[in-house]
Image (cartoon, rainbow, N blue to C red):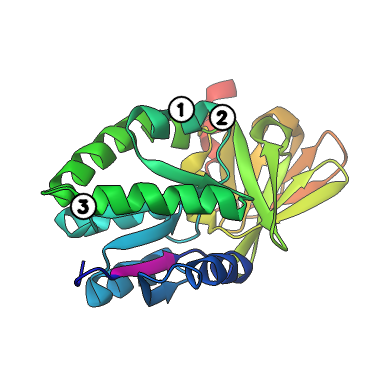
């Protein structure tokens, strides 16, 4: 800290969430806001440039999530980190076990104040940064399996947070900087790349059949050969998708396994 001033950064991809934290920080006389970022990739540069004492870090972000930001920073991780998350209670136990503070969205001013008080205590300790790194490494190890092949996906829209069971997804298509998750007659927009969502899903169940399409193999009813090595993929609800002949098409593996 510079004297008694806590240099602080806010890292969250939701403008409303950043505004909420900014408003609450304005009520803390010993806090100086030195940087904000709505993107995990930009966050690394923001933190390196601002050198904050404390960061409010969103866990779920596109391109690079909160854990990716910390792993990239390595020894440059600030002395105090408050996670902002929509994780369920099971995962939150990991934060408690490793003595890392978090704000469960949506949070109130009372809970925010408690997190700030804990951050102040952390910053008063000698050698806080190495201790923080040890805690973070332990947490990352604990949550590694939680992030890989998750049972639920977090959906954020207009400041609201909801959860979608992965098993309910029929197929996924790319849509600009987002992916659209199709579940029956309903679809959900998720700010994520196709590469990112593919890495999170079970590769034995969800396969890429086109650069812009991933399908749940349990929903496939029929494959119809087309021209030049392409296939029409017919889902149980009648949805018709096209599997390309490019290297991104993993459908060939499924066909060979069934032969």
What SS does tag 3 mark? Answer: helix
10 Å crowding of disc 3: few (<14), some (14-19), many (20+) = few
Q: Position of residue 88 (x, y in %)?
A: 58, 33
Q: Which residue is mark 1?
A: 93
Q: Disc number at residue 89?
A: 2
Q: Nearer the viewer, mark 3 or mark 1?
A: 3
Q: Position of residue 162 (x, y in %)?
A: 71, 45
Q: Is residue 32 above or below residue 147?
A: below
Q: Is residue 59 among what the camera can see?
A: no
How far apart marks 3 and 1 lie (CA) works out to: 25 Å
Q: Nearer the viewer, mark 3 or mark 2?
A: 3
Q: Which residue is mark 3?
A: 124
Magenta residue span:
6-10
Q: Is residue 7 among what the camera can see?
A: yes
Q: Position of residue 184 (x, y in %)?
A: 84, 40
**Front in this rendered view, residue 1 or 101:** 1
How far apart marks 1 and 2 lie (CA) works out to: 6 Å
**Tags 1 and 2 in contact by the CB under 8 Å rule?**
yes
Magenta residue check for 3? no
**Front in this rendered view, residue 166 or 139:** 139
Corner quadrant of residue 139 = top left
Q: Quadrant of the N terminus?
A: bottom left
First in sequence: mark 3 vs mark 1: 1
């Amino acid at each position: 800290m510079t004297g008694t001033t806590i240099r602080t950064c806010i890292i969250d991809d939701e403008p409303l969430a950043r505004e909420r934290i900014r408003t609450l920080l304005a009520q803390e006389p010993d806090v100086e806001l030195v940087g904000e970022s709505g993107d995990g990739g930009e966050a690394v540069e923001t933190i390196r440039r601002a050198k904050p004492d404390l960061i409010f870090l969103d866990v779920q972000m596109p391109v690079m999530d909160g854990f990716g930001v910390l792993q990239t920073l390595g020894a440059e991780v600030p002395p105090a980190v408050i996670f902002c998350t929509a994780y369920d209670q099971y995962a939150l136990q990991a934060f408690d076990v490793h003595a890392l503070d978090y704000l469960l969205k949506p949070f109130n001013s009372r809970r925010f104040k408690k997190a700030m008080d804990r951050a102040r205590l952390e910053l008063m300790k000698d050698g806080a940064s190495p201790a923080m790194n040890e805690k973070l490494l332990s947490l990352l190890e604990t949550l590694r399996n939680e992030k890989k092949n998750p049972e639920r996906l977090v959906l954020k829209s207009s400041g609201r947070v909801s959860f979608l069971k992965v098993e309910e997804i029929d197929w996924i298509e790319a849509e600009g900087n987002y992916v659209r998750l199709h579940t029956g007659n309903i679809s959900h927009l998720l700010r994520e790349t196709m590469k990112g969502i593919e890495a999170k899903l079970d590769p034995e169940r969800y396969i890429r059949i086109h650069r812009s399409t991933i399908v749940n193999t349990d929903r496939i009813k029929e494959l119809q050969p087309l021209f030049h090595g392409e296939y029409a993929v017919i889902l149980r609800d009648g949805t018709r998708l096209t599997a390309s002949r490019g290297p991104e098409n993993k459908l060939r593996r499924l066909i060979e396994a069934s032969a």
